[in-house]
């Protein structure tokens, strides 16, 4: 299914640059999380979904704003163009996914709690949402609270979306940045994740 929306101003080149450093660490986290799962959904997706190269699942759905980027995504089985700020409803059935991801992008959503409740709706019980973040963004696109806060607060903000959605176990955060990022020599990488409650 494709829904029309206005094109994103985020360029594929920027996403590529950002992901060069994050990709291996995100992929290894995804590899650990994606064993024995079938259905994946990547929100605010683009030409890449950061899933491991070896396919251990049956289906990947993606949504995002830029159709040109989405149609380049080789890991996706289907895509939907959707501006979640205009319409936060996800175009999928209840309990249809094992894992929902959103990589360095949830900070662009101005109705994050509505989207997170939708994530809870489309996840199967026991399924997991994973939001990842670093320390870069498009200031003209990110929500105001993101621009006024730092890395640790960003982790708490994502965790609070999961908490207040009301359908997840307590969220946890992984610091994937390693010693170099803690010393300021590399970008930080955080993954905030929570399981849908039974
Ligand atoms: C920095 S890029 C990251 C793309 C991808 N997640 C990745 O890791 O390469 C931000 C993405 O968020 C998407 N995006 C921004 N605002 C959005 C919105 N309101 N609804 C849906 N997608 C949005 C853009 O289309 C863009 O692909």
Image (cartoon, rainbow, N blue to C red):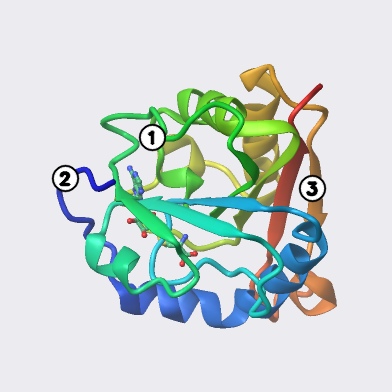
For disc 2, the marked residue is 4
The answer to whether residue 184 of the structure is visible from this angle is yes
Instruction: Nearest to the eye among marks 2 and 3: give it.
Output: 2
Q: Which mark is residue 58?
A: none
User: Residue at coordinates 47% horizontally, 45% vertically from top-left?
Assistant: 107
Along the polypeptide, which appears first: circle 1 or circle 3?
Answer: 1
Residue nearest the viewer, comparing 143 with 5: 5
Q: Determine whether the residue tagged by mark 2 lies in a helix, strand or loop.
A: loop
Residue nearest the viewer, comparing 192 with 139: 192
Measured in 3D between alpha carbons, the distance from the residue under mark 2 to the one under mark 3, in whole angstroms, is 35 Å
For disc 1, the marked residue is 91
Q: Position of residue 142 (x, y in %)?
A: 39, 46
Q: Are marks 2 and 3 in contact (CB under 8 Å)?
A: no
Measured in 3D between alpha carbons, the distance from the residue under mark 1 to the one under mark 2, in whole angstroms, is 13 Å
Asked which quadrant contains residue 182, the reply is bottom right
Q: Position of residue 103 (x, y in %)?
A: 54, 57
- Left or right? Give the position of 97 relative to 179: left
Q: Position of residue 84 (x, y in %)?
A: 34, 37
- Left or right? Give the position of 184 relative to 4: right
Measured in 3D between alpha carbons, the distance from the residue under mark 1 to the one under mark 3, in whole angstroms, is 28 Å
For disc 3, the marked residue is 173
Q: Determine whether the residue tagged by mark 1 lies in a helix, strand or loop.
A: loop
Asked which quadrant contains residue 22, the reply is bottom right
Q: Is residue 4 above or below residue 59?
A: above
Give neighbour class at mark 1: few <14, some 14-19, many 20+ (Cα, 10 Å). some
């Amino acid at each position: 299914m494709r829904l029309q929306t206005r094109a994103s101003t985020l360029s594929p080149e920027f996403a590529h640059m950002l992901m060069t450093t994050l990709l291996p660490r995100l992929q290894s986290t995804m590899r650990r999380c994606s064993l024995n799962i079938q259905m994946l959904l990547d929100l605010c997706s683009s030409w890449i979904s950061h899933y491991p190269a070896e396919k251990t699942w049956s289906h990947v759905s993606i949504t995002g704003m830029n159709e040109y980027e989405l149609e380049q995504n080789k890991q996706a089985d289907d895509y939907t163009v959707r501006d979640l700020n205009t319409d936060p409803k996800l175009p999928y059935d209840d309990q249809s996914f094992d894992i929902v991801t959103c990589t360095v992008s949830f900070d662009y959503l101005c109705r994050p709690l509505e989207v997170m409740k939708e994530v809870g709706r489309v996840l199967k019980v026991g399924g997991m949402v994973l939001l990842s973040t670093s320390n870069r963004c498009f200031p003209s696109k990110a929500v105001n609270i993101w621009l006024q806060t730092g890395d640790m607060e960003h982790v708490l903000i994502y965790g609070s979306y999961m908490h207040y959605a009301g359908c997840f176990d307590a969220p946890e955060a992984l610091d994937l940045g390693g010693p170099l990022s803690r010393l300021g020599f590399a970008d930080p990488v955080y993954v905030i994740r929570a399981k849908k409650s039974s």
